[in-house]
Image: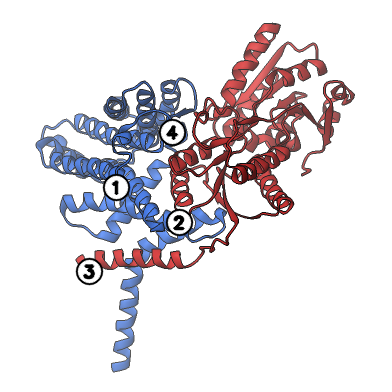
Amino acid sequence: MMTIAVASSALELGLIYALVALALFLSYKMLNIADMTTDGAFTLGCAVSAVMAVAGHPYLGILAAMLAGAAAGTVTGLLQTRLGVPSILAGIVTNAALYTVNLAVMGFSSNVSMLKTATLFSAVQGLPGGRLAVCLAVSALVAALLALFLTTRLGLSIRATGDNPDMVRASSIDTAVTITIGLAMANAITALSGALLAQYQRTADINLGNGMVVIGLASLIIGETMLGRGGLAGRLAGAAAGSVIYRFIIALALRLSLPSEGLKLVSAVIVATAIAGPTIKDRLALARMRAGRREVG
Amino acid sequence: MRTRILSLCLTVVMAFVMAGCSGTKPAEAGTYRIAIVQQLDHPSLDQIRTAITDRLQVRADELGLAVSYDLYNGQNDASVLAQIGTQVVSKGYDAIIPIATLAAQCMANAASGTGIPVIYAAISDPEKAGLTGLDGVTGTSDALDTDAILDMMLAVSPQISAVGLLYSNSEANSLTAIARAEAYLDAKGIAHIAKTGNTTDEIVAAAGALVGQVQAVFTPTDNVVMAAESAVAQLFIKSSIAHYAGADSFVTAGALATCGVDYTKLGSYTADMALDVLTTGKVPAYHVMEGGIITVNTETAAALGVDTAVFATLGPTVVDVVTGSR
């Protein structure tokens, strides 16, 4: 009974952050761009959602956050495609600028408290598993829509752009458009994740997005390594699952009653072990096979 | 593929079961279990935590209670704090003592509706943080008396023409204090220049930008500047700029002086408050700690040529420290 609440919260947080993993799947795996805008876009989503929830419009806040994220992604895309700024630097520049924008959205305060406002989750407050259902519904919907989108003409162009931009240009498709649209979508999904998190935690802080791109990429790679590949839908599910697994790892590290300073080291060790798992297994199998051959021969 | 997922799920379940078998202390009858949640590793917060844990043991002995506590650290990560919140609630602690604003908000959120009292320590502005008017939530505030510090600055150097304001935009504690400082300086007709940063290197660069432009610098209770204070203090001392700050941890790191709260007393008061809430069940309104404790760094004063006798006239309590003490 004691661990159900902890597991449930790890699952809910994992599903919210899974959206960042999905966004990075689009920008990193499909478009082959390391999108540094993620941190800023996440915080932008938090800020917009928090401010609108306090003003009495939590649902509109989610939509507004997505639009804001899309705008941020568009700026990065334009910097990259029209102004010739290298992709990583374009993301870094937008990220830096977003810091001021986020502060401005929050009314030049670094913290917005929503402890007394109605949020998206207030509707399901009393119901057991209500919050989990909301998180699951949103993540599943976004994953499904993304999978569907990536099979459309535009989606395929985006996938091709990451694979072989020269070939795409030779086919008279404007890579500038595909990159910009791809980045706008990815950052809209990241901002959605931030918006959900702000309403889930009832607080928005300027530092919430710090390190989000690292956590997102880690979730992406954990999911891919542990759950293998299996077509587009399988990879998307893997990305989302990776995020949940990461949150469970942190919950486990917390549960182990180790000194509180050791939390990050323990999480890192568990993550490394999890990712190295398949390789270690293969090496052991190989060693066993070699030992077997030596015995026989 | 399916067996891999199955074995993965079973491993996770097993891990949870094993984790459940270790580390749970059986609650003895009449023991109060308290969770102390520190937001991040930081000298001021560490000082408060030590004061709380020391005082809990002393006071528990005085009252004849059995009190046990567990320490949690959020590593300044809001999601980790959220998971700590859920864990603390599910483990059934009798009270939660969060240290610093984000930790307090996350704990208040996690504990809402559960009846577990939250007694926060050192929140500069509980109203702004949304922590007032909540059931079962109270604590201590170290609201900064900006005017007193600026009065002190003018008493030491009456001829000041320009003051620097060094702080971080990402600190909720700083913005109100800086706004008050600007109003105070405008009223006195003194020019002020604000420089900000969000990481240690940015703060050092901001401090460097103030050199040659101001005669004194004011910093509120800003955790980010505190992390950079050793470097910043050296820079200011070399350029003969007096650094006035909001907390005594700054002064121990090299700033000239502060007029504020004794954080050890704040920690003790919070511990007393927590035990009172547990024994009487009544949750009082939050308590603003009295400031007025002037802490002066004698080494810095000597290097700047400031006569420390001035400070004795400004307040009832003056504590002298040297860099690196405590």
User: SS class of the residue under badge 1?
Assistant: loop
Would residue A115 be visible to someone looking at this image?
Answer: yes
Name the chain letter of the residue that bears numbered label 1.
A
Q: Name the residue under label 4.
A: A203
- Chain letter, red: B
Question: Which dot marks residue B3?
Answer: 3
Name the chain letter of the residue that bears numbered label 2.
A
Question: Which dot marks residue A145?
Answer: none
User: SS class of the residue under badge 3?
Assistant: helix
Q: Nearer the viewer, residue B125 or B245?
A: B125
The answer to whether mark 3 and mark 1 are in CB contact below 8 A is no
| Residue at left offset 64%, top offset 27% | B143
Judge depth for marks 1 and 2 and give the one in front: 1
Percent position (x, y) of residue B19? 44, 64
Chain A drawn colour: blue
Name the chain letter of the residue that bears numbered label 4.
A
Q: Name the residue under label 2.
A: A267
Are marks 4 and 1 in one subunit?
yes
Type of the residue with mark 1: Gly
The answer to whether mark 4 and mark 2 are in CB contact below 8 A is no
Give neighbour class at mark 1: few <14, some 14-19, many 20+ (Cα, 10 Å).
Answer: few
Q: Mark 1 points at which residue?
A: A129
B314 horizontally vs B181: left or right: right
